[in-house]
Image: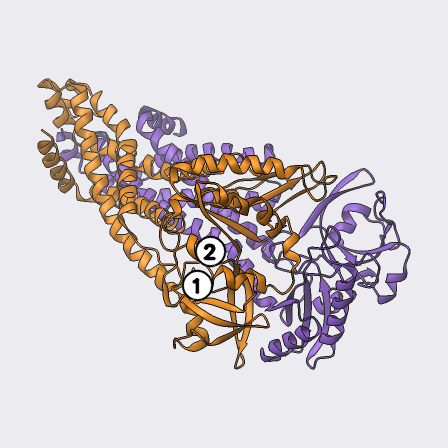
Chain colours: A orange, B purple
């Protein structure tokens, strides 16, 4: 039966070429845009190098101190993380914890050339929480950090800029008025990977002054690697309990009364940074809802358009429907048939959209608009795209199918309008 | 005639309702993109109130964890003062100044103060006396800050014209107190007025601005985050390295990053314009999709009405008459969609949903959206209505 429907569907598409063209144009453009958005989200949040353990990783990315009159929101400071988060590594469910700063621009001058690099200060654990691809040398260690050794890990782009792509391990690099010895070179990490992207990593203890050691608010992240992803909820709860304890020891108890933060997955962390206003208890859920609303809002116009075209197509086939009705086809059969036809149309459109997306992404990567970005289609995105296409096909097919099934046989046979 | 048209549209209300909905939603899409674009364009036409082409900013990163709420200590303020002196002595540097906030930067300080019972919203910055020379501010009344102001028993401030108008109306603000001081605060007094200062750049609307003096020598002084330098035209970028070396020698523990304001401006423009470019591209494709869809639907509708049109032709109606009937019917449908969209959009000023939108920008956005929808509608009707007008009466009357 389905085979028959498919045959009819393809025949119908071939019959009115102009209608097929405008439907496919709308569908493929809509799916192209949605696929591009999906590829971008996948690029930022998927469990890929260096965040291969993203499914069992949490981060503390934001901290809010609030009092009756003052509110301060920023990245947590080293003082807070060292005192309250680092000791959590003793919990049996946690494998290790790394502290790292957000990326800051530092400037180097090399033979009259100005080089700007994104630099992070990190401890030795970072290299074991995140799995960078080393192309040369290796990471610096916890001992390096404790002894304040001026060593650095750089990425390939930095190697290109400073050493013209020649092997760099053992050579020194000057940045922000300090000299570092290069111990390792890693592959570039896309700029949008907000917890791992940088050009240059150096030990925390090489910071120019030691003021960071006392800070509650500063520019550090804590990255927590759990042993199993099933432990994440328990670790989150544990973190909240520790936060309640820390609240009692706030440095300025008159100005600030409460502390708000979360141990977040990559997605929740980004949601916490992007959502305006004060932090909400469940940033991940809110972000997901916001993305869904955005998607539906974007799909509104293409859907109305497709419904409109579909209705016109049905009028075209009124007599066919009339015959089928007269010979006893139930409304449900007709609805099913039309939905399948519409799905076939949507899936063809989706395939065109996928091909277009591959081209657009290639052009985007080549443009260098986002540093080190390498957006590409993969199986995950394909599955998302398929889900979106099926949803779109049903969403835009239900109303015309219902209208079609309501067509009166006698009227339809006479070829009258709906 | 008009009544007749409405009747024709009403007779096909179901298929027309969908078309009206489609036009209404497209109208909203065009309105949003057009208003955003016009908002930037309207802002762009007004003067900035400063000159940025020859100015470099040095971001100064002292360890500001100690000290008061702003961070930093009086000792660091003294180091900052030494940096200013050091930089001023370099060849090709025309002026330099410290500032808590720099032009075009996305960050900033803003707040709302109650003055004489009025709530006034403003942005503000702490600057050193050199700021007016570095940024080329235009003085309108009174004077700018001087080094000697550090000895005053009250806090001197300079405000921009907007703020002067908001607080003092037509009266001369110079010498007047600015609000009532809170506990532990000193009285603020206006010493001068400068022309409108638009810190956020050309694309953002003009707002109230207030300058406070940071003299760096008072006991409560804190270091500033930015050191602005005006260089002589034609200065080569190599001066950057020399500047950083000199500053590094004065404060080896601090970090310095030089960024010409041209670069800061480019970053901020990209930040504001990217959403417009993305939304504009999406809207273009959506409208193309809608346009093609309308052609298809109209074509099909007219095919359905071949008999009706044939009858009119047989009764003596000219091709032109058929043409204009189709076109006018579509105009009625479009008008209904546009009307519905307008009714929705009008809610924005009525409910005061977006404060920054001026009436002129809002009205122009509406107009652009209307014109666009009528144009698309006419364009999409032309081909189907030509086909309809070509119908031969004999053929049409036979048609089943």
What's the residue at 35%, 52% (across, down)? A48
In this rendering, would B148 be left or right of B14?
A: right
**Residue B137: % across, % down:** 73, 64
Chain for disc number 2: A
Q: On the image, numbered disc 1 is attached to which residue?
A: A139
Chain for disc number 1: A
Q: Which of A50 and A197 is in front in this view?
A: A50
In this rendering, would B51 be left or right of A292?
A: right
In this view, B88 is above or below A102: below
Q: Is mark 1 on a helix, strand or loop?
A: loop
What's the residue at 51%, 67% (across, down)? A117
**Residue A411: % across, % down:** 17, 20
In this rendering, would A398 be left or right of B207?
A: left
Question: Could you tell me if residue A9 is visible in this image?
Answer: yes
| Label ID, residue B52 | none
Q: On the image, numbered disc 2 is attached to which residue?
A: A126
User: Which quadrant holds residue B24?
Assistant: top left
Pointer 1 with pointer 2, Cβ within 8 A: yes
Q: Nearer the viewer, residue A45 or A336?
A: A45
Q: Which of A225 and B27 is in front in this view?
A: A225
Q: Which quarter of the rendered picture does the C terminus of chain A lie within? A: top left
Q: Is mark 2 on a helix, strand or loop?
A: helix
**Residue A160: % across, % down:** 41, 73
Q: Which of B339 and A231 is in front in this view?
A: A231
In this view, B305 is above or below A173: above
Q: Which of marks 1 and 2 is nearer the N terminus?
A: 2
């Amino acid at each position: 039966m389905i085979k028959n429907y498919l045959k009819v569907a393809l025949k119908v598409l071939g019959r009115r070429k102009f209608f097929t063209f405008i439907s496919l144009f709308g569908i493929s453009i809509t799916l192209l845009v949605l696929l591009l958005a999906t590829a971008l989200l996948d690029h930022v949040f998927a469990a890929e190098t260096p965040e291969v353990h993203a499914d069992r990783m949490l981060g503390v990315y934001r901290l809010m101190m609030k009092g009756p009159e003052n509110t301060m929101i920023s990245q947590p400071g080293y003082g807070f993380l060292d005192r309250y988060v680092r000791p959590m590594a003793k919990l049996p469910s946690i494998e290790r914890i790394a502290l790292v700063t957000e990326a800051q621009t530092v400037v180097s001058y090399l033979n009259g050339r100005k080089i700007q690099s994104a630099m992070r200060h990190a401890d030795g654990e970072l290299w074991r929480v995140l799995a960078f691809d080393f192309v040369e040398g290796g990471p610096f260690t916890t001992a390096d950090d404790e002894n304040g050794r001026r060593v650095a890990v750089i990425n390939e782009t930095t190697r290109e800029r400073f050493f013209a792509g020649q092997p760099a391990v053992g050579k020194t690099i000057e940045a922000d008025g300090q000299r570092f010895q290069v111990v390792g070179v890693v592959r570039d990490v896309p700029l949008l990977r907000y917890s791992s992207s940088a050009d240059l990593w150096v030990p925390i203890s090489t910071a120019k002054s030691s003021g960071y050691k006392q800070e509650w608010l500063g520019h550090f992240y804590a990255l927590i690697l759990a042993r199993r992803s099933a432990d994440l909820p328990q670790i989150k709860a544990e973190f909240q309990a520790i936060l309640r304890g820390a609240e009692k020891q706030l440095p300025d108890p008159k100005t600030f009364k409460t502390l708000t933060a979360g141990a977040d997955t990559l997605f929740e962390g980004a949601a916490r940074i992007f959502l305006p206003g004060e932090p909400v208890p469940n940033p991940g859920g809110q972000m997901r809802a916001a993305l869904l609303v955005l998607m539906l809002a974007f799909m509104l116009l293409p859907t109305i358009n497709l419904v409109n075209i579909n209705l016109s197509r049905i009028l075209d086939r009124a007599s066919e429907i009339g015959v089928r009705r007269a010979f006893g086809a139930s409304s449900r059969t007709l609805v099913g048939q039309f939905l399948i036809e519409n799905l076939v149309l949507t899936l063809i459109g989706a395939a065109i959209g996928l091909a277009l997306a591959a081209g657009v992404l290639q052009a985007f990567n080549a443009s260098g608009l986002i540093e080190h970005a390498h957006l590409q289609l993969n199986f995950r995105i394909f599955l998302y795209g398929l889900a979106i296409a099926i949803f779109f096909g049903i969403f835009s097919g239900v109303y015309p199918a219902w209208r079609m099934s309501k067509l009166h046989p006698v009227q339809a046979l006479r070829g009258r309008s709906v | 005639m008009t009544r007749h048209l409405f009747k024709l549209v009403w007779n096909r209300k179901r298929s027309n309702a969908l078309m009206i909905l489609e036009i209404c939603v497209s109208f909203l899409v065009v309105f949003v993109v057009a208003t955003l674009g016009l908002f930037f364009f309207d802002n762009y036409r007004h003067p900035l109130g400063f000159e940025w082409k020859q100015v470099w900013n040095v971001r100064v990163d002292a360890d500001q964890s100690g000290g008061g709420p702003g961070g930093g200590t009086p000792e660091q303020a003294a180091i900052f003062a030494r940096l200013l002196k050091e930089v001023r002595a370099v060849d090709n540097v025309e002026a330099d100044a410290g500032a808590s906030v720099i032009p075009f930067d996305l960050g900033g300080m803003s707040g709302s103060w109650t003055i004489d019972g009025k709530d006034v919203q403003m942005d503000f910055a702490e600057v050193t006396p050199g700021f007016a020379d570095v940024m080329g501010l235009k003085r309108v009344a009174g004077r700018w800050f001087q080094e000697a102001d550090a000895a005053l028993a009250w806090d001197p401030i300079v405000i921009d014209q907007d703020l002067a108008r908001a607080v003092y109306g037509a009266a001369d603000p110079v010498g007047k107190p600015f609000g009532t001081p809170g506990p532990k605060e000193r009285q603020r007094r206006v010493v001068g007025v400068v022309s409108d200062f638009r810190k956020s750049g050309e694309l953002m609307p003009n707002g109230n601005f207030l300058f406070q003096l940071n003299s760096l020598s008072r006991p409560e002084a804190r270091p500033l985050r930015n050191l602005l330098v005006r260089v002589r035209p034609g200065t080569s970028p190599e001066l950057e390295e020399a500047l950083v070396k000199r500053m590094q020698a004065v404060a080896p523990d601090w970090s310095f990053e030089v960024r010409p304001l041209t670069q800061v401006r480019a970053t901020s423009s990209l930040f504001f314009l990217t959403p417009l470019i993305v939304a504009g591209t999406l809207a273009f494709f959506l409208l193309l999709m809608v346009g093609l869809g309308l052609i298809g639907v109209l074509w099909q509708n007219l095919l359905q009405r071949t008999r009706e049109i044939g009858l009119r032709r047989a009764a003596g109606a000219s091709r032109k008459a058929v043409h204009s009937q189709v076109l006018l019917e579509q105009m009625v449908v479009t008008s209904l969609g546009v009307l519905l969209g307008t009714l929705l959009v009008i809610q924005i000023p009525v409910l005061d949903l977006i404060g920054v939108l001026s009436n002129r920008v809002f009205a122009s956005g509406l107009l652009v959206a209307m014109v666009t929808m009528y144009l698309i509608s006419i364009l999409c009707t032309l081909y189907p209505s030509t086909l309809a007008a070509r119908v031969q009466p004999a053929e049409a009357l036979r048609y089943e």
